[in-house]
Amino acid sequence: MAHSARDLRRDCYAAVDIGASSGRVVVGFVEDGRIHLEEVHRFDNRQVRRGGHDCWDIDLLYGELVRGLALCKEAGFAPKSVGIDTWGVDFVLLDADDNLVGDAVAYRDERTQGMFEVADAIMSPEELYRRTGIQRQPFNTIYQFLALQRENPEQLEAAETFLMIPDYLGFLLTGEKALEYTNASTTGLLNAETGAWDETVLARFNIPRRLFRNVTMAGACLGPVKPSIAEKIGYDTCVVLPATHDTGSAFLAVPACDLPAVFLSSGTWSLLGVENRSPLTTAAAYGENFTNEGGYHFRYRFLKNIMGLWMIQSIRRELNGITYVVDEKAIRKGRLHQYMRVEGLGQEVGFEDLIRAADEAECAGVQASIVNVNDDRFLSPDSMIEEILEACEETGQAVPQTLGELMLCVYESLARCYREAVEGLSSLAGHGYKSINIVGGGCRDGHLNRRTAEVCGLPVYAGPVEGTALGNLAVQMLADGVFPHLKAVRAAIAESFDVQKVEP
């Protein structure tokens, strides 16, 4: 339905929320103190193979972003502002004419293999952690830079500007460049104490300082969209920087029931932790591999990155034949074909089918095998199913023989990893926690919520589902004066959305 300029709703805001597998454009507005959401566009995010690497299709993301903003008008909205959030660590480089230098290589690409050893020869991991407070993970931006130095040094020579993915999309809309703090913190190049680029780290790792402009805090206005964009989407609007790292936005939306509470942003990754006012970069925190990522208004998200729903998403894709890859060993064992013939599954396997299979296996008294969900082997295997089976076999455990046993293994492994993270948090903080508050798509998974409550021995508050988009919108509303402070936004979120309590 077409809407004239006169009848467009303008007291609203648009969140562009892009995850590793999909993106959406969500409009939010406030009526009678309650926050209302309307999703106007959803699209797939995909990786493409370019130059021997797995890369993000930036042109696709930008096209879908603009299309989503245009669809806002079709739905009757002309948002006052737009905010963009994405996953962390990944970036693009621009030359002096603002053209892309190289591709937007994805964090799951294998180019960072072996970079731990290279980095450790330059600076000890303990010193790097004391300076940046960032969890040691092979895909951190600092290791991507080391890989780039070795494979494509000419790209670094030609580059003039470093922008992370949401910063680049904002630049395409406005022509203005900024590096927002929460996402910049994921690079492993910011000083945890100051929130500025760590000059010592940049110098020691020979990463050109000229690439990095000073960081900007969430809530700043990047500027109006370019006239050509306004013409395409059918209205004028501006871009406001939310917490551009999706987890930073998700943490903003946690209603925080039963304090002190553990926060869990549950999506492709599970980000489990708490909000602190200062970084914790002790040897004990390093030993537990917790990270100090930037939060809204210079808070710190002290958390652990856990594999999350990626394993479940990958299993579903395999069963549906979307990225079905199998090697000779798997064909010989015939195990993947066994899963493809599971009785009772429709042509399209849904997440509810996987949950039901786990429930049925649990009711049948199956003893779940356990794998280390954070093992790098599960980051980007050719076959997630086969990788899980191999891990069980290698550790002398029962190898899952049915889909239910496979799913029970994944769920139980995740829940136990959550418990270990909560125990680590309690040890570091010197006190226990009263609840686990889950936001994001994973909060709809009843089996995982129940097992998390039971295994961790804590009540789980599940919801809201739209955590990341809500947090994105919350910053825009705060910037526009709709709410006076963060506490008021969280109170409105608690009133506006269903939060389910799951007792242990």
Image (cartoon, rainbow, N blue to C red):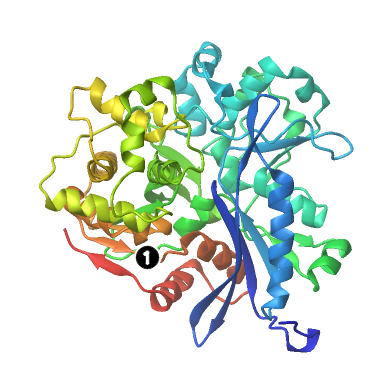
Taking the image as shown, residue 349 lies to the left or right of residue 219, namely left
Q: Which quadrant holds the C terminus? A: bottom left
User: Farthest residue toward the top?
Assistant: 121
- State the residue in front, 261 or 239: 239
Examine the image and state in which quarter residue 202 appears. Answer: top right
Label 1 packing within 10 angstroms: few (<14), some (14-19), many (20+): many
Tell me the residue at 58%/69% (across/down).
Answer: 478
Numbered label tally: 1
Q: Is residue 275 left or right of residue 295?
A: left
Q: Classify residue 425 by image quadrant.
A: top left
The vertical placement of 432 against 489, above or below, is above
Q: Where's residue 149, x and y in %?
A: 68, 18
- Identify the residue at horizontal 39%, vertical 39% (top origin): 307
Q: Position of residue 473 (x, y in %)?
A: 57, 67
Which secondary structure, mark 1? loop
- Above or below, comparing residue 385 to residue 467 in the picture: above
Question: Residue 288, can we see it?
Answer: no
Left or right of 208, for residue 279: left
Quarter of the image where the N terminus is located = bottom right
Q: Which of 458 and 298 is in front in this view?
A: 458
- Is residue 156 found left or right of 295 in the rendered image? right
Residue displayed at 49% across by 67% down: 486
Residue at image mark 1: 463
Q: Where is residue 472 in the image (x, y as percent from the top left)?
A: 57, 62
Residue located at (46% from left, 73% from top): 488
Q: Residue 303, percent across and down?
A: 39, 43
- Tag 1: amino acid: Gly
Residue 496 is at least partly visible in this image: yes
**Residue ranking furthest to the left:** 365
Front one among 58 and 183 = 58
